[in-house]
Amino acid sequence: MSRVADTIIIGGGVVGCAAAYYLAKAGNSNVIVLEGTKSIGHGGSSRNGGGVRQSGRDVRELPYAMYGIKNLWPNLSEELGVDTEYTQKGNLRLGKTEEHLKKLNTLASNAQSVGLDVRMVDAKEVKEICPYLADDIIGASWCPTDGHANPLTTTLGYYKRSLEMGVKYYTDAPVKELRKIKGKVRQVVLNDGTVFEGESIILAAGYESREIARTVGVDIPMTRLIDEALVTEMQPHMFDIMLGTAGGDFYGHQAHHGSFVFGSDSGYEVVTDMKDPSAMETNSLTLSASCRAIMSYVPALKDAKIVRSWAGWLDNAFDGVPFISRVDEAPGLILACGFTGHGFGTAPAVGLMLSQMVAGEETVVDISALRYDRFKPIR
Ligand SMILES: Cc1cc2nc3c(=O)[nH]c(=O)nc-3n(C[C@H](O)[C@H](O)[C@H](O)COP(=O)(O)OP(=O)(O)OC[C@H]3O[C@@H](n4cnc5c(N)ncnc54)[C@H](O)[C@@H]3O)c2cc1C
């Protein structure tokens, strides 16, 4: 296969695969995707909780989160030829204390200011929306257009469709460094020294993007955190909404086949020395803490058995929103990383915008607030 393309994408997660698909859809299928592991979607993209939400987001992310939910998610299964299991039945973000409600209220007001349909509901309405929840929940934010989807089939769909349209994928192709030619980032070098070359380079390798960008002198301010997830045995159908909590104890939903999928940032970092980032383990200490939180909000699940658990790394930007940006000092390079644990729901919109950036077009919404150089020195 050729090692020269118009666009080289580093990282075969949902963001890289979606960018490849929208490039090919726009007629630019001379694209190579380089994935460091043996399988597409090996990172967060096949390990996440499937939340496709707008509520609870930073206002800088909302315009494209809302764009994707209105324009891309509804027809995605049809478009990609897979069942993404996209379900748009709303999201309750639950609170048990006045402090929780205050936090939810601020998030809801911020989101309303940019046009999101989200409002606070009291304990009675929470129970009307979802009767399976605990009696000590005193209120929630309610966003009726939020939902969830299946991350595995969605990532697979973008991969398969773009492959059919001519995109070339290399797995087992870990990128070590970028190189500039005549001042422009053009070359992508693998660990074994193989060199790929492209006009545009999209860097969508999760946290590893930081190491790769450093090779052309760009530091991306993000860190690495682990998130854990679990799936229960199949349950009778209870509800189709997505759940979250003000305190971030857990998030989750009931999948189409009946199992519940929950995720949580359960503090694994505290009980491990995290020496080996490739060891994506779960832990009985931290997962049982997540289970206690889940049972305290959804008592109907107290006897549900867990059939599997897993973990994945998050690329946490220091201010909680991603870097989707060209880089002035490194022309040719486009960053797409730092998704801070909520980049699955926005992947279709991000993939589309990346394809527009490569083509030199305006993006569907303004994302200048996500530039890599938004951090300013503290005076
Ligand atoms: C447990 C968990 C639950 C989550 N829940 C949600 C949720 O409910 N909703 C939501 O929106 N988001 C959620 N997220 C976050 C979401 O999964 C990510 O934001 C999203 O998948 C980001 O996609 P990506 O393609 O940028 O990253 P990834 O899927 O991590 O893809 C990056 C790819 O780059 C590859 N790579 C790394 N280094 C190199 C290299 N040197 N060379 C080549 N390739 C390389 C990796 O192997 C990987 O395949 C969750 C994440 C986790 C871990």
Image: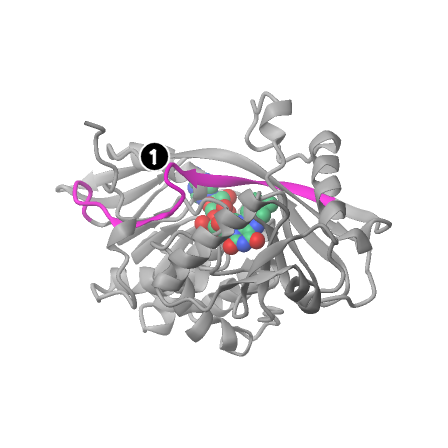
Residue 103: x %, y % from top left:
49, 47
145 to 10, vertically: above or below: below
Query: Magenta residues?
Result: 309-331
Count of picture labels: 1
Q: Nearer the viewer, residue 371 or 176?
A: 371
Residue lying farthest right? 303
Name the residue type under label 1.
Answer: Pro
Q: Quadrant of residue 188?
A: top left
Query: x, y percentage for residue 124?
Result: 67, 64
Density class for disc 1 (Cα within 10 Å; few <14, some 14-19, many ≥20) is some
Can you tell which quarter of the image residue 1 is in? bottom left
Picture layout, residue 46 above or below residue 26: above
Residue 284 seen in the figure: yes
Is the CB of mark 1 within 8 Å of ligand 1? no
Label 1 sits on residue: 221
293 or 176, which lies in front? Answer: 293
Element assignment for label 1: loop
Position of the C terminus, as image quadrant, is top left
On the picture, is 266 further left or further right than 53?
Answer: right
Render colour scheme? one colour
Residue nearest the observer in this picture, 288 or 26: 288
**Residue 251 placed where, x, y %?**
62, 51
Residue sitting at x 84%, y 51%? 304
Q: Going 21% across and 30% down the picture, which residue do you hit?
A: 377
Question: Is residue 312 one of those drawn in magenta?
Answer: yes
Can you give x and y, in whole percent of width and height, for residue 357 in the image? 26, 60
Residue at 51% of width from left, 60% of height from top?
53
Q: Quadrant of residue 312?
A: top right
Taking depth in this image into account, of 191 and 306 the one nearest to the observer is 306
**In magenta segment, residue 8:** no
